[in-house]
Image (cartoon, rainbow, N blue to C red):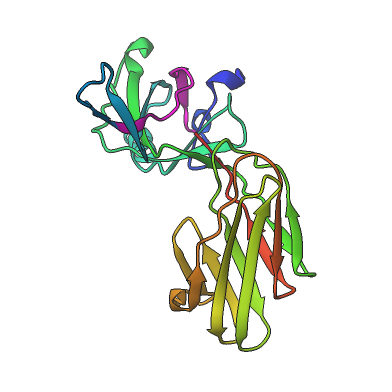
Amino acid sequence: MNHDMTVIVNGEHTIDRGIQALRIPPVTTSGERYETHHIPGRSEPYVERTGELEMLTIPVEFFYKNEEPERAAEFLQGARTLEFGRMPGWLYNCQVLDRIEIPRGIVKTWNRFTIRFLCYPLMRESYPIELTSHTGELWVGQNLGNVSAHPTITLVVPEEDTATVRLSSEYGDATEFELRGIPAGEYIVSSELGGVCDTAGVNRTQYLWGDFPVISWGGKTFIEASVDDFTVRPNWRRR
C-alpha cells in the first residue's frame, strides 16, 4: 500500500471499507486571523495578530470500489477524526457538513467523488502519551508538537487540603495553580477544556485558583506538586 495515500477516518482505514483515496491535498497549515490598522503618517499598515486560527477545509478525492455507496456515504458523513499516512501519529478532529454524492457508476471510473473534511486547525496525537509520578515530581520531555500544549493533569488528594502544582520550563516560563480546600479524592484538571472535575464528572472548578497549566513549545518542562500521585497527559498539538 502507498502510505502517502493512506486515509484513516475514525481510526479505520478507508480502504478497508472499499474506499480508495485517489488524491489528497498538499500539507496545509491553518491560517491565523489578523487585523490591519492604518496609522496616519505611516506608509505601511500595522498588522495585529489576533491569536485565533482558522478552520481547515481538506478535500480528498476517493474512488469507491464496492456496490453499496449508501454505506460509504454513512461512514464518511460520520467522520470525527481524520489521519493521513504521510503524517503518522497525528490526527485532525473533523466534521463532514457538505452533502455527499457517490455515483452508482457502471463504468468504474464514474465512482469518483470528493469529500470536504472540515478540520479543527491543530492536529492532536493519535495515541496520546501519559506520564505518571508517585514522588510529586516529574520531567516532561521535549514538546513533540510545534505550539504550546494544554495538558490534562489528574491528581490524587489523600485528604482535604490545598493541592499545588507548578510547571516550569527550562527556558524560564512557569505556570502554577492550586486546588484550595478541596476534599480528598481524585481530580482531573483539563487546560484544554478549561475546567476541573472529579472522576464522576462533577464540576469542581470552583476550587481552582491560578492559571490553567500550559506546556511551552521547545525545551523540557519540570512539574512539581504538593501531592505525591499525579498523572499528566501533555496533549501535544501541531499546526
Q: Which residue is at 76% across, 64% downward?
A: 137
Apparent side of residue 121 relative to residue 231 in the rendered image (left or right): left
In which quadrant of the rendered view does residue 188 lie?
A: bottom right
Task: Name which quarter of the figure residue 146 lies in.
Answer: top right
On screen, residue 179 above or below 222:
below
Q: Is residue 4 above or below residue 188?
A: above
Q: Is residue 178 left or right of residue 206?
A: right
Hey, which residue is sitting farthest right in the picture?
Answer: 135
Q: Determine if the magenta segment contains residue 182.
A: no
Viewer-nearest residue: 99 or 73: 99
Q: Residue at x 63, y 73 (%)?
A: 164
Q: Is residue 25 magenta?
A: yes
Where is residue 97? Give x, y as percent.
Answer: 27, 38
| Stretch in magenta | 17-34
Which residue shows up at 54% across the image and 66% down it? 189
- Residue 118 in the figure: left or right of residue 209: left
Query: Looking at this view, is 23 or 152 the one in front?
Result: 152
Q: Position of residue 132 (x, y in %)?
A: 73, 62
Q: Residue furthest front?
A: 41
Query: Can see residue 185?
Result: yes
Whether residue 68 is visible, yes or no, is: no
Tally of numbered tags: 0
Q: Position of residue 198 (x, y in %)?
A: 52, 76
**Is residue 106 found left or right of 60 in the rendered image?**
left
Quadrant where the N terminus is found in the figure? top right
Q: Please, is residue 140 above or below residue 231 in the view?
A: above
